Amino acid sequence: MKSKKGDIVRSGGHGYEAVLSDVVRLIQAGRSTAARSVNAVMTATYWGIGRRIVEHEQGGAHRAAYGEALLKRLASDLTARLGRGFSERNLEQMRLFFLTWPISQTTSAESLPEFDRAHRISQATSAISSSALSPAPLPAFPLPWSHYVRLLGVANPEARRFYEVEALRGGWTARQLNRQIGTQFYERTALSRNKAAMLHKGQAATPDDSVTPEEALKDPYLLEFLDLKDEYSETELEAALIAKLESFLLELGGDFTFVGRQRRLRVGDEWYRIDLLFFHRQLRCLVIIDLKLGRFTHADAGQMHLYLNYAREHWTLPGENPPVGLILCAEKDSAVAKYALEGLPNKVLAAEYRTALPEERVLADQIERTRRTLEVRIRSARRREQK
């Protein structure tokens, strides 16, 4: 006797549910990949439109006035034929896109091992390039068009390249990219310990690169997204960071993952609580963060040393490196930090946090000093290599 269709489904039990879950995941992944591919194809198309506009402009005289008239007429005709999305302003952005990102400067997915391979849409762009309407190959752009539009507003080429690479490596959304540019992440990174070397390289670290805690942790951190009042307690600061955890993780860096808050530990007869616990993927270790409203003191280093000893013995898993401590304070004296933190068996760092963006003029002066120092180091290194 043949079983009914419903009986077959029911007899499958958990087996059917597994098949259903797998099919759903495949469809969702396919839809996501298709959306990314369409976005990437359109970005390459906009680059091609910009190229065609520039090529046409180069063929005549009185380029400035002619180019403006060309964009105005194109915007009118394209909108009439194809609808919205081809305003004069948008066409100008496409033109600048081509001028700013020549083929040799585009960032490929292969240059970043951590980048999702689904973004490699060379086959899709090749399909466009092979058409009669495209006189030359179109490059593959791994970021969405909205990201490139925001990057066009970054005047410094080194900063623009930095944001492009970091957006790829960190998988930033357009909102996150806008926040990082708006809070001068590039400039603040240049001032953060050994980050000047990363800026000089102009590229993100790869998984094979060795990263030190000094390089992985910033100083200072900008927490303007918390919208804290003039007076607040450590509890309120911690609660605000947890409430804005996504923004806090973005400020910490793309390699941090949140583990927990107010983690309890018992040493002898005393109970302690650590404020925040994270894991850093490249350092491959736990990162304990202790929040301080006031100035950093040597006593803070001693307390963190206790936490790290306990975490190394009880919380560290096989294959992980010893934990690192970060004391996040409102103010830090460099001399006190040096003598309190150097030579400890555990790696403890102290960093300041700011709840408002520093003045642009002050930041610019600091950046210029950092650049000069970096240039001196580079020249010294070259002289040593020549000897």
Image: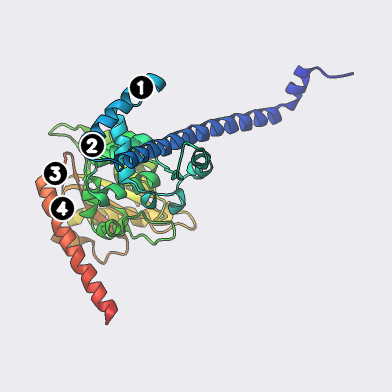
Q: Which amino acid does label 3 sit on?
A: Pro
Question: Which residue bears the numbered disc 1?
Answer: 79
Say whether disc 2 or disc 1 marks the residue closer to the N-terminus: 1
Q: Which of marks 4 and 3 is in front?
A: 3
Q: What residue type is labelled 4?
A: Lys
Say whether disc 4 or disc 3 marks the residue closer to the N-terminus: 4
Question: Which residue bears the numbered disc 3?
Answer: 358
Q: Which amino acid does label 1 sit on?
A: Thr
Q: How crowded is mark 3: few (under 14 residues within 10 Å), some or many (20 or more)?
A: few
Do tag 4 and tag 3 residues touch (Cβ < 8 Å)? no
- Rendered view: 238 above or below 194: above
What's the distance in space between the residues labelled 2 and 1, CA to CA?
Answer: 50 Å
Say whether disc 2 or disc 4 marks the residue closer to the N-terminus: 2
Q: Residues within 10 Å of mark 2 (few under 14, many from 20)?
A: some
| Secondary structure state at the residue bearing disc 3 | loop
What's the distance in space between the residues labelled 2 and 4, CA to CA?
Answer: 18 Å
Judge whether residue 247 can be spotted in this image: no
What's the distance in space between the residues labelled 3 and 1, CA to CA?
Answer: 44 Å
Looking at the picture, how far across and down is residue 300, in whole percent? 22, 53
Question: Which residue bears the numbered disc 4?
Answer: 332
Q: In this view, does 177 lie to the left or right of 1?
A: left
Q: Residue at x 12, y 44 (%)?
A: 360
Say whether disc 3 or disc 1 marks the residue closer to the N-terminus: 1
Do tag 2 and tag 1 residues touch (Cβ < 8 Å)? no
Q: What residue type is labelled 2?
A: Leu
| Secondary structure state at the residue bearing disc 4 | loop
Question: Which residue bears the numbered disc 2?
Answer: 237
Q: Which of marks 1 and 4 is in front?
A: 1
Q: Is residue 52 left or right of residue 156?
A: right
Residue 75 location, quadrant = top left
